[in-house]
């Protein structure tokens, strides 16, 4: 709203006063709204997505994948208990930018994570066996007799290709993982100490991993990333470890597809996200506001499509409280 000099002479004193008053009020309201938006305890806009719970998922696993504190999800959806979610249920994930495909738990993954009590794991190091055939038992024998490894198999995991009576894509767990021991797969950059060694059977200078091997690797790696907070840049081939002199895991390993599959499952670079939503706790009124928003969510949700939502709510600054709900009831 502006006043032109050419119009001033035509206005009466009363009209001029009204115009000036309107400008002052408009300016005051605009400033007040901007201050509220900047103030962390004022109005803020929360964006998020609706995640549809799949079989085998837990709220803890969902929170780890989206990097949102479990408390925020509980408050946003007015959940009475984080242990009670159902298959097909839609959960509003505040702050999330896109729907993530979360790898569900299975009995083997639960066992793997149960064994993995150490917090020292910072890398996942990918290898190929450089052989057409093999399994954990064959490699264990070779490492003991030819490489003289006292504890046998140097890898923590082996992903088979269907040879030597193993299923294509079968994940074998090495003794070093069960006992949370150092690996013997990568001396470069302290990889044996802080790196989880995964070996895929095959020579990827001549071929590529089978589809089932690829799927199993994505499944295993994504869960290890959820569990230990390993960022995408720390998932490396053996040759990418600083100081390594090797071409492992081969020139044909599908890095682009592998990293894209991990990104779809919520594994990100450390520079782009951080765990949780620091300094924010959604108040009790948020679930009611989310209910209001959900009433307007299109029917596309019922067909399994993803939908982004925006809700304006009051927020209160608070310290994050990280919950480790690994034993949450799995959605069935």
Image (cartoon, rainbow, N blue to C red):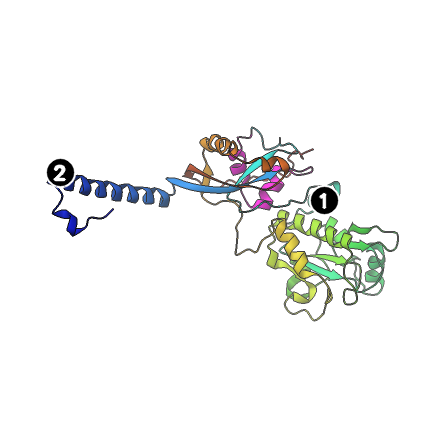
Q: Which residues are magenta?
A: 54-79
- Outermost residue, top side: 80
Looking at the rendered structure, the secondary structure element under dot 2 is helix
Which x, y percent locates residue 112?
A: 72, 46
Neighbour class for label 2 at 10 Å: few (<14), some, many (≥20)? Answer: few
Q: From where the camera sits, is residue 119 visible? A: no
Neighbour class for label 1 at 10 Å: few (<14), some, many (≥20)? Answer: some
Q: Is residue 181 left or right of residue 315?
A: right
Q: Is residue 88 above or below residue 111?
A: above
Residue 72 inside the magenta-drawn segment? yes
Which x, y percent locates residue 268?
A: 58, 53
Which x, y percent locates residue 267?
A: 61, 51
Point out which mark residue 109 bears: 1
Give the image quarter of residue 302: top right
Q: Earlier in the sequence, mark 2 or mark 1?
A: 2
Q: Quadrant of the C terminus?
A: top right
Q: Nearer the viewer, residue 66 or 47?
A: 47
Looking at the rendered structure, the secondary structure element under dot 1 is helix
Q: Nearer the viewer, residue 99 or 8?
A: 8
Per the image, the residue denoted by label 2 is 14
Q: Nearer the viewer, residue 93 or 282?
A: 93
Which x, y percent locates residue 291?
A: 50, 31
Residue 128 inside the magenta-drawn segment? no
Give yes or no for contact between labels 2 and 1 (Cβ–Cβ under 8 Å): no
């Amino acid at each position: 709203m502006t006043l032109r000099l050419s119009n001033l002479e035509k206005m009466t004193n009363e009209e001029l006063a009204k115009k000036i008053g309107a400008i002052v009020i408009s300016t005051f309201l605009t400033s007040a709204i901007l201050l509220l938006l900047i103030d962390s305890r004022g109005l803020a806009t929360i964006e998020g997505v609706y995640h549809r719970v799949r079989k085998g998922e837990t709220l803890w696993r969902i929170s780890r994948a989206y990097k949102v504190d479990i408390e925020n999800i509980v408050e946003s959806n007015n959940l009475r208990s984080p242990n009670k979610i159902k298959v097909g249920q839609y959960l509003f994930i505040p702050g999330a930018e896109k729907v993530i495909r979360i790898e569900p738990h299975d009995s083997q993954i639960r066992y793997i994570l149960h064994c993995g009590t150490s917090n020292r794991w910072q890398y996942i190091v990918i290898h190929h066996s450089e052989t057409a055939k093999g399994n954990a038992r064959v490699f264990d024998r070779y490492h003991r007799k030819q490489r003289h490894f006292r504890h046998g198999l140097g890898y923590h995991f082996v992903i088979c290709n269907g040879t030597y009576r193993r299923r294509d894509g079968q994940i074998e767990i090495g003794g070093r993982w069960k006992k949370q021991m150092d690996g013997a797969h990568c001396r470069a950059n302290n990889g044996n100490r802080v790196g989880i060694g995964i070996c895929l059977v095959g020579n990827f200078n001549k071929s590529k991993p089978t589809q089932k091997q690829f799927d199993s690797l994505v499944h295993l790696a994504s869960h290890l990333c959820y569990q230990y907070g390993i960022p995408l840049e720390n998932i490396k081939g053996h040759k990418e470890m600083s100081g390594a002199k090797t071409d492992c895991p081969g020139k044909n390993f599908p890095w682009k597809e592998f990293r894209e599959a991990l990104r779809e499952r919520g594994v990100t670079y450390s520079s782009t996200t951080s765990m949780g939503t620091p300094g924010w706790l959604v108040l009790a009124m948020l679930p009611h506001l989310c209910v209001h928003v959900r009433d307007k969510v299109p029917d596309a949700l019922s067909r399994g499509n993803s939908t982004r939502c925006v809700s304006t709510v009051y927020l209160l600054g608070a310290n994050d409280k990280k919950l480790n709900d690994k034993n949450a009831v799995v959605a069935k």
